[in-house]
Amino acid sequence: MIFETHGHYDDEQFDTDREQLLEEFQRQDIRYVMNIGANIATSKASVELAHQYDFIYAAIGTHPDDAPELSDAAIEMYRQMAVDEKVKAIGEIGLDYFHEDVPKEAQIHWFRKQLELAEELKLPVVIHSRDAAKDTMDIMKEMQGRLCGGVIHCFSYSTEIAREYIKMGYYIGVGGVVTFNNGRKLKEVVEAIPLTSIVLETDSPYLSPVPFRGKRNSALNIPYVAKEIAALKGVTEEEVYDVTFKNSLKLYRMEENMQAEA
Ligand code: NI
């Protein structure tokens, strides 16, 4: 069974065939999908999608690129939205210094506010961090002991930093980049860290694995990622699916649901 821990299936790139695609997921043993909001509009869309499909859950939050849309009223709206039982996490939130459109101070301010919301709501966090390793780590350390875990999504930093996050109780999100020829750094991270700290993700519609690099991504491509992780770690693909599935349930605190269903 596959747990797709990070996709954006509300994206307009899925408008033409969303229904067929999501039905295909269920035939392909994709047991759960966490649909991730990246701003107010897509967070609302995530919750809507989660209500249309039993196997889809939602994360709500605003990505650093969209931080200027936030206000205290917006945070209050997220607080209200999070009451919904299908909302399982706050994210994706974080820091992105690759694009310099949004001033760092604004990104940091709203990252902290959303982390505080996650603390208050006792929800795990989905962290986006690009070219902002130090500031992200500093803030996560500040918050250490106050949050109930989360995932460092689309992990792009060093093995040392991965180990630090794992020590703090976070999962490392691994997707299509691990199959790229220039994905060496991530391959090294995957080799070095325990499988019990990895979750599978796509960031669909982006970051398709080889051989579909550049095309629209979906959870149907996760086997290419699992195969690469299995090769790097010298385990079977089944083991990758089993362990990461359990990791994902722990990450999103869905273990009790599973037991109730069983
Ligand atoms: Ni994403």
Image: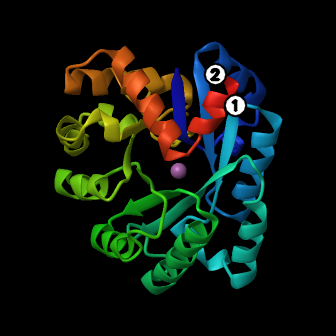
Neighbours of disc 1 within 10 Å: few (<14), some (14-19), many (20+): some
The quadrant holding residue 104 is bottom left
The quadrant holding residue 224 is top left
205 vs 90: above or below: above
* Amino acid type at image mark 1: Phe
* Amino acid type at image mark 2: Phe
Name the residue beneath numbered marker 1. Answer: 55
* In-front residue for pair 165/253: 253
State the image coordinates of residue 44 (x, y, percent, origin top left).
77, 56
Front label number (2 vs 1)? 1
Q: Are marks 2 and 1 in contact (CB under 8 Å)?
A: yes
- The colouring scheme, among rainbow, by chain, secondary structure or one colour, is rainbow
State the image coordinates of residue 21 (x, y, percent, origin top left).
69, 24
As helix, strand or loop, the secondary structure at mark 2 comes to helix
On-image quarter of the C terminus: top right
The residue sitting at 56% across, 31% down in the picture is 218
State the image coordinates of residue 61 (x, y, percent, origin top left).
62, 63
Neighbours of disc 2 within 10 Å: few (<14), some (14-19), many (20+): some
The residue sitting at 37% across, 62% down in the picture is 130
The residue sitting at 75% across, 41% down in the picture is 50
Describe residue 39's horizontal placement relative to residue 225 as left or right: right
242 vs 63: above or below: above
The residue sitting at 61% across, 37% down in the picture is 256
* In-front residue for pair 123/42: 123
Mark closer to the chain start, 2 or 1: 2
As helix, strand or loop, the secondary structure at mark 1 comes to loop
Q: Is residue 218 visible?
A: yes
User: Cβ of disc 2 within 8 Å of ligand 1?
Assistant: no
Q: How many marks?
A: 2
- Residue 91's mark? none
User: Cβ of disc 1 within 8 Å of ligand 1?
Assistant: no
